Image: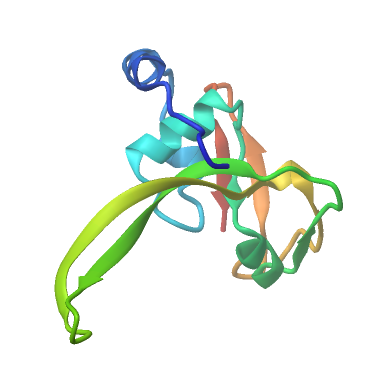
Amino acid sequence: MRGERLDWQMLIETALTAPGHMGDTYNRFYQYTFLNQLLLLMQGIREPIGTMKTWNALGRSVLKGSKAYQIVRPITIMKKNHEGEVQATFTRFKPVRCIFAYSQTTGAADQVGGSLRLELHPAPMGAVLGQ
């Protein structure tokens, strides 16, 4: 993972030309930032996503051999003085691979509020969680 760089120009271009509503697809179980939504779109994801922990909590398992998708996570760094007291804190952002798409999972389909129903809509970004 070390040394990976984000293509900011491509990310901004994607933001300006992306069809549909990315939040409808990616924000099922967690509110991802716009940057992360764009990053997921650029990786070709067009379905609900979650971490392994999220899918396990929903009664689903990530398929063996599945490759996690990348998002950017904030990392807080605390600078301490020689007495061990926190002198300053910094927030940095680190690309990490920790996201799996619905198609990379298997298991119970009916685990969210009694029913996990995915409906595909004509909109390019369209996977919707039904109640």
Q: Residue at x 76, y 58 (%)?
A: 109
Judge whether 75 appears above or below 111 on screen: above
Q: How many marks?
A: 0
Residue at the far bottom in the pictured view: 83
Corner quadrant of residue 86: bottom left
Q: Residue at x 63, y 67 (%)?
A: 53
Judge whether 121 appears above or below 108 on screen: above
Q: Residue at x 17, y 84 (%)?
A: 85
> Residue 105 at what x, y percent from top left?
77, 52
> Residue 71 at what x, y percent from top left?
49, 43
Is residue 125 something one can see in this rendering? no
Q: Nearer the viewer, residue 122 or 4?
A: 4
Q: Residue at x 54, y 22 (%)?
A: 124
- Image quarter of the N terminus: top right
> Residue 78 at what x, y percent from top left?
25, 69
Q: How is the image coloured?
A: rainbow
Corner quadrant of residue 45: top right
> Residue 18 at what x, y percent from top left?
41, 18
Is residue 104 something one can see in this rendering? yes
Q: Nearer the viewer, residue 106 or 79?
A: 79
Residue at the far front in the pictured view: 82
- Image quarter of the C terminus: bottom right
- Locate residue 105 relative to residue 88 in the image: left or right: right
- Locate residue 34 relative to residue 5 in the image: left or right: left
Residue at the far right in the pictured view: 64
